[in-house]
Amino acid sequence: MTTRRIPTYLAVTAAAVVLVTGCTRGATGGPAGTAVGGTAAASLATPSMTWSPTFKGYDPPTKFSQGKESAPLPEDARTADVLLDGTIYYIASNYGLEADALYGHKMAGIANSTHGGNLHSPPVLAQAGGQRVVLTAVRMVIQGQGTSVDRTAVELVALSTSKGSDSWTVPIDLPQDYTGIRSLTVLGVRGTTAVIAGADANHGLVWAVDLAAKKVLWTQKGFTGAQLSDDQVVGLVSPEYTKHQVSALKIADGSTAWTAEQTYDLLDATLTPAGPSRVALQGSSFTGFKSNAWILDSTTGKQLFDFSGGSTPFTCTYDERSVTVCADKDIAFAFDTASGKTLWRLPDDAKTRIAPRVTTAWHGVVYGTTSRGPVALNAVTGQDLPSPPTLAPLLVNTYMSIGSRDTDGTALSVYPAVGF
């Protein structure tokens, strides 16, 4: 299964086809795009005559089918390239977005970028002007003509979740001093405004894009965006290479809403989401290169609690209910997202339990692995569930998971959920 472009002659005939679970894949296409001027051709293949079954959901699931109902993802697909939405999974690539149905794993929709890219952002689900859409941003090199030089640009690609034929793109020019951009993230949408964050080796960059008008509203250089909080973009400003402050921009116009007073002297500082209205600030101190980590209130920049002392930077996952779970290779801990209260930490003080390698958390369950195989923990208490999962998913929802049978997390596949 690979993410592919749809030839022009199919794009025209497919325009009226709606997203259905039983679609078959379309003809293969190459990297040459057909859409121009801020709109992208998107198409669906001819609907299949096979009726799709009614899937039973499990909330949350711990048993997953690894038989013929499972299907491999493209070889180059990473966990961050995939988004789960009901019984449809979306795959972002350097060529845009593809939607696939869990039943039969057949293509249900596609949105192409206008040029083949060399970097893309993880797909995100957003509500944009009353329509549910999946978004990804693609970095591309547009070849010059005549005496003009090649130029690097970014394009926002959108695909409707209700109509696989409804998609569009928005071109975004890069400032000349940011052509080396090496990371892209779509932070989300407020109203019809999408916010995209990028960064090169030293500086951040944020854009606000009007999805209705398909144009860039504003660009803010020198700002590393991390999260949307109400009507603001929360991120880092770094007036000096090792000095960082948490700040917020107004989504409406890009002006500064506030900047926290505290300055953090850190190497390799990062600011990442840690649940609703929470962000994790991490970096290494100059003295002993100790790992420092704090959870901050993303509405004010106020430091809430300190989780410094881990051996490596940790990642945090919100279970989409009430708990945020953070882990590195040696520790795992959870806190109540609303109150900030620490719920549990592994290894425990008595040294009777070890920390799992956390893969994800969802709806009250923490999934992970130990040397003994997959494990599942109660997200609130941290206790092992009576029955271990059949695999440790990297992504999961009511109907399916993305995971790997390999311990190194390669060769990703889609596994239908079959039980608790």
Image (spheres, rainbow, N blue to C red):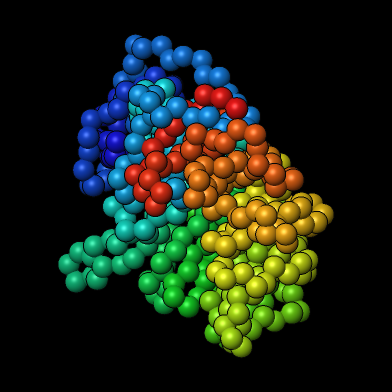
Q: Is residue 82 depicted above or below 131 in this figure? A: below
- The answer to which image quadrant residue 283 occupies is bottom right
Residue 215: image location, x then y, percent: 49, 54
Can residue 385 be seen in the rendering of this structure? yes
In the displayed structure image, the side of residue 297 where residue 326 appears, left or right = left
Q: Is residue 277 above or below residue 384?
A: below
> Which residue appears at 38% of the width and 26% of the height?
67
Work out which residue is located at the far left of the displayed protein and give it. Answer: 146
**Spot occupied by residue 183 in the image (x, y as percentages of width and height):** 44, 64
Query: Residue at (76%, 67%) from the top-left corner?
Result: 305
In this orientation, which residue lies closer to the viewer: 308 or 14? 308
Image position, residue 411 (x, y; %): 34, 44
Q: Which of 143 and 240 is in front in this view?
A: 240
Res. 97 visible in picture: no
As rendered, which of 131 and 88 lies closer to the eye? 88
Q: Where is residue 198 in the image (x, y as percent from the top left)?
A: 48, 65
Left or right: 246 in relation to 161 = right
Instruction: Work out which quarter of the rendered image holds the C terminus and state it.
Output: top right
Please tell me which residue lies in front, 267 or 420: 420
